[in-house]
């Protein structure tokens, strides 16, 4: 992924953080959790490309649409369980 023509490690960092989040959520909730790596670019005039190396790249203006209209992955029970797990600070302190 390039920003102003310079290579960055944003995609690699997003994959690493998604993998970490999935592992921590799975350990705490005792369920398999799929986490999609996502990089949101703030302040860019344009964003070319939508995905790189398995990471979705979005402009800030596209984030709400992406979150609201993507296919649902969880039913309401699973969503509520993950919400309770994710909001605990202890989930992330490992």
Image (cartoon, rainbow, N blue to C red):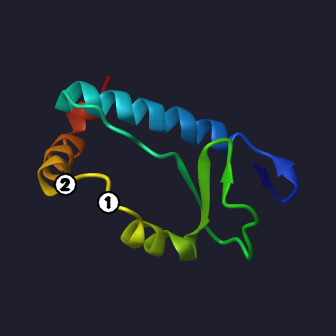
Whole-percent x, y for residue 10 in the image: 66, 44
Which residue corresponds to the image point at 84% horizontal and 60% vertical from the top-left? 4
Q: Secondary structure at mark 1?
A: loop
Q: Quadrant of residue 11?
A: top right
Which of the two residues, 8 or 67, is positioned nearer the viewer here?
67
Which residue corresponds to the image point at 54% horizontal and 73% vertical from the top-left? 62
Whole-percent x, y for residue 90 in the image: 21, 32
Which residue corresponds to the image point at 70% horizontal and 71% vertical from the top-left? 44
Reply above or below: 6 against 93. Answer: below
Whole-percent x, y for residue 16 in the image: 54, 32
Q: Secondary structure at mark 2?
A: loop
Quadrant where the C terminus is found in the figure: top left
Q: Which residue is mark 2?
A: 75
Whole-percent x, y for residue 60 in the image: 56, 70
**Mark identifier at residue 72:** 1
Viewed as shown, does residue 7 lie left or right of 73? right
Within 10 Å of the Cα at label 1, are there few (<14), some (14-19), or many (20+) other Cα atoms?
Answer: few
Residue contact at pointers 2 and 1, CB within 8 angstroms? yes
Viewed as shown, does residue 76 lie left or right of 53? left
């Amino acid at each position: 992924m390039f920003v102003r023509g310079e290579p960055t490690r944003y995609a690699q960092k997003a994959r690493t953080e998604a993998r970490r989040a999935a592992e921590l959520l799975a350990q705490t909730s005792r369920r398999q959790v799929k986490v999609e790596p996502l990089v949101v670019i703030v302040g860019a005039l344009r964003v070319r490309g939508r995905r790189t190396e398995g990471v979705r790249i979005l402009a800030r203006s596209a984030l709400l649409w992406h979150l609201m209209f993507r296919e649902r992955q969880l039913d309401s029970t699973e969503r509520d369980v993950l919400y309770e797990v994710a909001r605990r600070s202890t989930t992330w302190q490992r």
